Amino acid sequence: MALFYTDFLSLACSNVQTEKQWWITAFEAKETKVPVNWDCPLPSDVALKLPGADQPNILLSDRAEIERAGYDRQNNRPLVFCTNVKKAHEYLRGKHATADPIQDGGDTQFFEVHDAEGNIIEICKEP
């Protein structure tokens, strides 16, 4: 089983290429074609999939292009699940990602990591 997984997350970015490279470096995500069945495609869209995923599960879009198109793609706090919080934390720190300390949320453990543009991605132990 892969260390990280998510159903789907979408991020609006100032620089899609920088953000894409961050996901490739930090999570070893792979770029793939944007599926034709994804809603409201934009020319800047980049689809990525985390290791072990069968289909793309990350969408990166250019923020200015989103605004020009009049789409509502807000950056809600993305959530990525992991099988082992301590291992995930060590892994991302080894990839030079800015990872905050592991926290105990009562029912689960989690930590936050900051992407290339300062977005906070919550890494949470699988439910």
Image: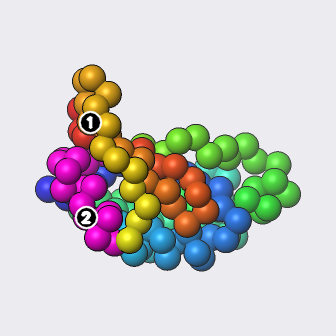
Visible residue check, residue 69: no
Q: Quadrant of residue 127?
A: top left
- Residue 85: x and y in percent read 22, 47
Residue found 29% across the figure and 70% down from its top: 94
Looking at the rendered structure, the kind of residue marked 1 is Gln
Instruction: Name above or below for residue 101 compared with residue 55.
Output: above
Residue found 30% across the figure and 44% down from its top: 102
- Check disc 2: other Cα within 10 Å, few if <14, some if 14-19, many if 20+: some
Front residue of this view, candidates 41 and 85? 85
- Residue 73: x and y in percent read 67, 46
Q: Is residue 70 left or right of residue 54?
A: right
- Disc 2 marks which residue? 91
- Residue 104: x and y in percent read 28, 32
Q: Tell which residue pokes out farthest to the left in this image.
A: 1
Instruction: Name above or below for residue 122 compared with residue 27.
Output: above
Visible residue check, residue 2: yes
Mark 1 touches mark 2? (CB < 8 Å): no
Looking at the rendered structure, the kind of residue marked 2 is Tyr
What secondary structure is the magenta-colored segment mainly?
helix
- Disc 1 marks which residue? 109
- Residue 6: x and y in percent read 36, 48
Q: Is residue 119 part of the magenta span, yes or no?
A: no
Stretch of the chain drawn in magenta: 81-95
- Mark 1 or mark 2: whose residue is earlier in sequence: 2
> Secondary structure under badge 2?
helix
Q: Is residue 87 part of the magenta span, yes or no?
A: yes
Quarter of the figure with the N terminus: bottom left
Instruction: Name above or below for residue 94 compared with residue 64.
Output: below
Residue found 38% across the figure and 71% down from its top: 96
